[in-house]
Amino acid sequence: MGKKLIIGNWKMNLDMHEASLYLHKLLDTLPSHRDVETVVAPTMLTLQSLSLQVNRRIVKLAAQNFYWRDHGAYTGEVSATQLRGIVDYVLVGHSERRHVFGEGDRDIRAKVQAAIRNRIQPVLCVGETAHERAADETRDVLHDQLVGGLANVTSEEIPEIIVAYEPVWAIGTGENASPDDVKQAAKIIRNQVEHLFGKKAAGSIRVLYGGSVNVDNAADYLATKGVDGLLIGGASLDAHQFSEIVKKAHKV
Ligand code: PEP
């Protein structure tokens, strides 16, 4: 597998000044590792100014959300077309978008397509709730979310797509999936991609883990078979912690 991908999701935190200071610290502490790609996903408000400050060889930017139409009468929305040249990645179907804002498969699949159409790499987030896990439905949930999210994608487009396995019960809770659970989930994801798009596609898609990752447990996930990187929420809000995690990825 290629480079490890480490994405920090700041969610609705850090104002313009704080975001700029954070980026300054990160650029200062992180060397450009050829084997690690480091990405931060700040709030929409700060993206444009951070894009002028960032050195893309060291840190790239992602958007946490966007609307799937490219232009038009959609008050309050920002499109992937407008994010072109500012971000390299976009999160799609994060559990908070699915569960707090009620995004369904139709929106998620349209967003995956919009990202690809605009040459931005979508990070499709999938994962089961605690209830689904207790009912032993993880495999079915991953299957449905992958089929739903990737319905209109071609096998040629698969290398542009990243899938993040983020069990909902592990996001922001301090409860982690075990590396073995993550290995199983990554295998289910690749098998499903193989079933839909063929063996080559399954080998080319990047799979991340996210859910209460921190400095102490990051290396275990990074060493887990089938895991190409991490999506980090809480622990990414501290530039020092985030940069320590990136350094661990470099060593793995
Ligand atoms: C996330 O926001 O995608 C996430 C995984 O959050 P945390 O690391 O805080 O669990």
Image: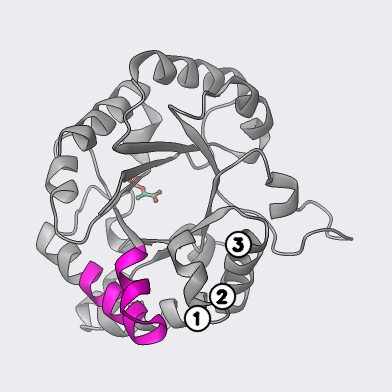
Indicate whether 251 appears above or below 128: above
Q: Is residue 64 visible?
A: yes
Quarter occupied by residue 166? bottom left
SS at circle 1: helix
Q: What residue do we see at 30% from left, 68% from top?
A: 203
In the drawing, does residue 87 fall left or right of residue 233? right
Q: Position of residue 129 (x, y in %)?
A: 33, 70
CA distance separating discs 3 and 2: 19 Å
Query: Can you tell which mark lies on residue 104?
Result: 2
Q: What residue do we see at 43% from left, 77% from top?
A: 145
Label 1 close to label 2 by CB (< 8 Å): yes
How many marks the image carries: the answer is 3
Three-letter residue code for mark 3: Ile
Density class for disc 1 (Cα within 10 Å; few <14, some 14-19, many ≥20) is some
Find out whether residue 192 is within the magenta segment.
yes
- In the image, is the residue at mark 1 within 8 Å of ligand 1 by its beta carbon? no
Q: Position of residue 76 (x, y in %)?
A: 79, 51
In the drawing, does residue 12 fall left or right of residue 214? right
Three-letter residue code for mark 1: Gly
* Precedes in sequence: disc 1 or disc 2: 2
* Precedes in sequence: disc 3 or disc 2: 2
Q: Which residue is mark 3?
A: 116
Q: Which residue is mark 1?
A: 148
Three-letter residue code for mark 2: Gly
Magenta residues, as a range? 185-205
Of residue 171 and residue 244, the one placed in the foreground of this image is 244
CA distance separating discs 1 and 2: 9 Å
Q: What residue do we see at 50% from left, 64% from top?
A: 93
Quadrant containing the N terminus is bottom left
Q: Position of residue 106 (x, y in %)?
A: 61, 78
